Amino acid sequence: MEGMLNYRQGESSNELIIFDSKRADVDGDGKIEKVSLVGTISESGIVASNIKITISNDTTYDVNLKTNKGYNPKLFLGDFTSDGLDDVFVSMESGNTGREGFFYIYSFALNNEQKIFDYEVFNNKYKYDVTYDDNYIVRVTSLFSPLKYMIDISNKGHYLNALYKSDGSLKRPTKGMVSPIIELRAIKDNNHYNLQAIQRIIGYYNADTLGMIVTPLSYDKFKNEFVSMTPYLI
């Protein structure tokens, strides 16, 4: 897979290594903690497993991740909750052809571990129906809100011959899909960060990308969760 990190080709998969490490006060005690993303690797040196967060100061505290296997595990520290403390953002790639990623964000304010973003919760909520229609139109309909989008695919060329008759009517009912998150971006906003979740609109076959859905997210401290603004297409 292009861009994969080769950590230590051929070494034992039982060796614990540090994939990424940063320093910040994440719990509000006034001391700087060392926050690390650690785990083991496969014999190929590519697949990371047993990935967990470790926070070290006077003691070491571990956070085990539900999804703890993937590619290119990365760590980012930033304040998503506007409390003046850095939160811990973990990302990794699935390695499959759909390009999905795995993402978690944790807050440790007042020494209280709280998962404030979970990619599975997002994926289970932000679902869409993708349907091909006559006249070279694809309709994308939100299953969680009244949002509806239309995509003009009339410029797809010979691709259309498999789907449409010469008069522009569909040969048969055809569906697409919207992928789980493929990218989660931290977006700086004054003294804190918001998020942008990116999903891929998939057409007739998996490699057929019709567009992307961007969902802006900001943390609501009263609801203790990220809430979305209106998703849009790019």
Image (cartoon, rainbow, N blue to C red):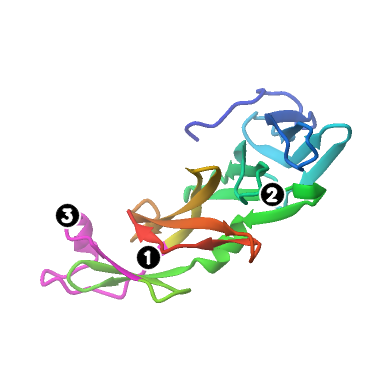
Q: Residue at x 37, y 65 (%)?
A: 176
Marks 2 and 1: CB-CB under 8 Å?
no
Three-letter amino acid code at the position of disc 3 = Gly
Q: Residue furthest right?
A: 59
Query: Is 114 on the left-hand or right-hand side of 3?
Result: right
User: Which comes sooner in the sequence, label 2 or label 1?
Assistant: 2
Residue 23 position by quadrant? top right
Say which residue label 2 marks. Answer: 106
The secondary structure type at the circle numbered 2 is: strand
| Residue 199: x %, y % from top left | 44, 55
Q: Main secondary structure of the magenta part?
A: loop
Q: Percent x, y for residue 227?
A: 54, 63
In this rendering, would 53 be left or right of 126?
right
Task: Report helix, strand or loop for mark 1.
Answer: loop
Segment tinted magenta in the rendering: 148-177
| Residue 80 marker | none
Three-letter amino acid code at the position of disc 1:
Gly
- Residue in view at x 34 percent, y 60 percent: 203
Compared to residue 220, the image places residue 21 above or below, namely above
Label 1: which residue?
176
Disc with the residue nearer the chain's start (3 vs 1)? 3
Give the quadrant of residue 201. bottom left
Q: Nearer the viewer, mark 2 or mark 1?
A: 2
Circle nearer the N terminus (2, 3): 2
Q: Which residue in the protein does label 3 denote?
A: 157
Q: Residue at x 78, y 30 (%)?
A: 16
